[in-house]
Image (cartoon, rainbow, N blue to C red):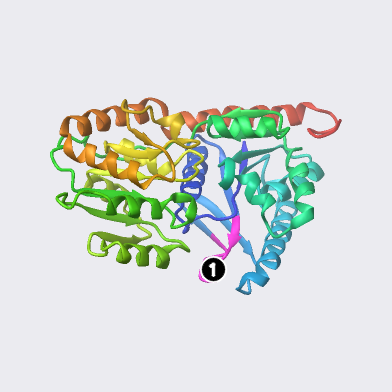
């Protein structure tokens, strides 16, 4: 089977969806399938085509002139060039797997109908920061309704958590499957020492969705007697505002803004507690990685996280938008070594048993093989009524 992954942003971008998209495409290749990726060339320094871990990646041109007024133009150029790519390379793939029910899914759905190629769409988030809400609040205004209607005609949808599946079905989407994200376990010794509780860590894009302002305000509420540092790993549009907030709270010396990090495993292995008070999530690759590393984790009770974490069993759940709750959870966890050990050990077991990429990739392959088989078995093509 020849699988084309369509994703708007890809390596060297390092957000959760991009990391998962790369890992999944590489897993398809490891299982003996032809796997390639098409994405946008958002930086001129990025190569138009390259091979990454045996995976062929195509980056088509995006006419980005900079500034808010050109945002719509950049989006239209991205969609146009993607459509042309799908047409021009139609003989190179059997099925299209799209990440996010946004611009890429709209174009892929149109091309799939024209070419009679099956299309599956992975929906990465629900709610306020969800795929559909992002589409509705986009620069395309009135036309967004028709773009979403076109996406609905895709052959299958993958919800990565329960809330996404519920939202899609409520919105009139059909053929919705639920497949959780998974991570590639790295060769790391199981954590044994839980005696320290001073090195805090978070992995997040610096965007309002991730609640980094809530984390900083929560840290400011910790008792002055607590000794701690935070490695804040990630980059994004909120960095300057967050650095200013840290300074305002008197925490500049304790919070280290690391920017993008590629040695995630090393960062997690040297940390003691993971905390991520997001306002909304799909699944949260960063949380999966932290739990696999054996870290006791504090996250918010939002979509995606609640599919992974059971409160006080394999992690801690706090309510969103509540710095005091974050502070209380951190204070409690810093105080109790037994709690850290219990949650960290249980969290790692959860990932090993339910959230590895091998299991996730097999579920995707079963779905995609079914779509290709159905498309070939339908005389008029997969989309004909």
Which quadrant holds residue 373? top right
Asked if the magenta segment contains residue 45, the reply would be yes
Which of 181 and 282 lies nearest the eye of the viewer? 282
Residue 22, percent across and down?
Answer: 49, 47
Residue 27, percent across and down?
Answer: 48, 39
47 is higher (above) or lower (below) than 307: below
- Left or right: residue 91 compared with residue 3: right
Asked if the magenta segment contains residue 374, the reply would be no
Rendered-image quadrant of the N terminus? top right
Q: How many marks?
A: 1
Name the residue located 75 percent from the left edge and 51 percent from the top edge.
144
Rendered-image quadrant of the C terminus? top right
- Left or right: residue 327 compared with residue 337: right
**On the image, numbered disc 1 is attached to which residue?**
43
Q: Is residue 53 visible?
A: no
332 is higher (above) or lower (below) than 81: above
Residue 365, percent across and down?
Answer: 57, 31
Residue 79, percent across and down?
Answer: 71, 58
Name the residue located 54 percent from the left edge and 34 percent from the top edge.
160
Span of residues in magenta: 39-49
Secondary-structure class at tag 1: loop
Which quadrant holds residue 187? top left
Judged by its main secondary structure, the magenta piece is loop
Which of 145 and 95 lies nearest the eye of the viewer? 145
Which quadrant holds residue 95? top right
Name the residue located 29 percent from the left edge and 45 percent from the top edge.
327
């Amino acid at each position: 089977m020849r699988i084309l992954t369509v994703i708007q942003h890809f390596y060297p971008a390092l957000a959760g969806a991009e990391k998962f998209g790369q890992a999944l495409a590489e897993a398809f290749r490891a299982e003996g399938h032809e796997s390639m990726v098409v994405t946008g060339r958002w930086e001129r320094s990025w190569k138009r085509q390259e091979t990454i871990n045996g995976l062929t990646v195509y980056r088509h041109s995006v006419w980005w002139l900079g500034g808010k007024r050109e945002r719509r133009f950049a989006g239209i150029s991205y969609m146009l060039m993607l459509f042309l790519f799908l047409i021009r390379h139609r003989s190179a793939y059997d099925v299209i797997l799209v990440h996010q029910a946004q611009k890429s899914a709209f174009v892929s759905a149109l091309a799939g109908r024209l070419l009679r190629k099956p299309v599956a769409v992975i929906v990465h988030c629900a709610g306020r920061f969800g795929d559909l809400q992002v589409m509705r609040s986009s620069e395309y205004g009135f036309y967004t309704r028709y773009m979403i209607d076109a996406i609905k005609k895709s052959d299958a949808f993958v919800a990565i958590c329960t809330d996404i599946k519920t939202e899609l079905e409520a919105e009139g989407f059909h053929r919705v499957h639920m497949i959780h994200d998974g991570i590639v376990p790295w060769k790391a010794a199981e954590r044994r020492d839980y005696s320290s509780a001073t090195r805090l860590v978070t992995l997040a894009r610096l965007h309002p969705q991730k609640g980094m302002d809530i984390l900083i305000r929560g840290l400011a509420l910790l008792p002055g007697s607590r000794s701690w540092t935070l490695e804040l790993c990630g980059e994004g549009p909120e960095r300057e505002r967050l650095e200013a907030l840290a300074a305002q709270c008197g925490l500049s010396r304790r919070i280290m803004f690391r920017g993008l990090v590629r040695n995630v495993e090393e960062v997690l292995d040297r940390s003691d507690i993971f905390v991520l008070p997001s306002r909304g999530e799909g699944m949260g690759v960063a949380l999966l990685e932290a739990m696999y590393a054996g870290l006791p984790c504090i996250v918010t009770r939002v979509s995606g996280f609640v599919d992974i974490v059971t409160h006080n069993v394999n992690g801690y759940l706090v309510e969103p938008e509540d710095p005091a709750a974050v502070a209380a959870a951190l204070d409690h966890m810093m105080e109790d070594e037994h709690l850290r050990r219990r949650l960290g050990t249980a969290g790692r077991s959860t990932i090993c048993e339910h959230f590895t990429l091998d299991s996730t990739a097999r579920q995707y392959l079963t779905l995609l093989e079914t779509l290709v088989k159905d498309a070939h078995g339908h005389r008029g093509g997969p989309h004909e009524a």
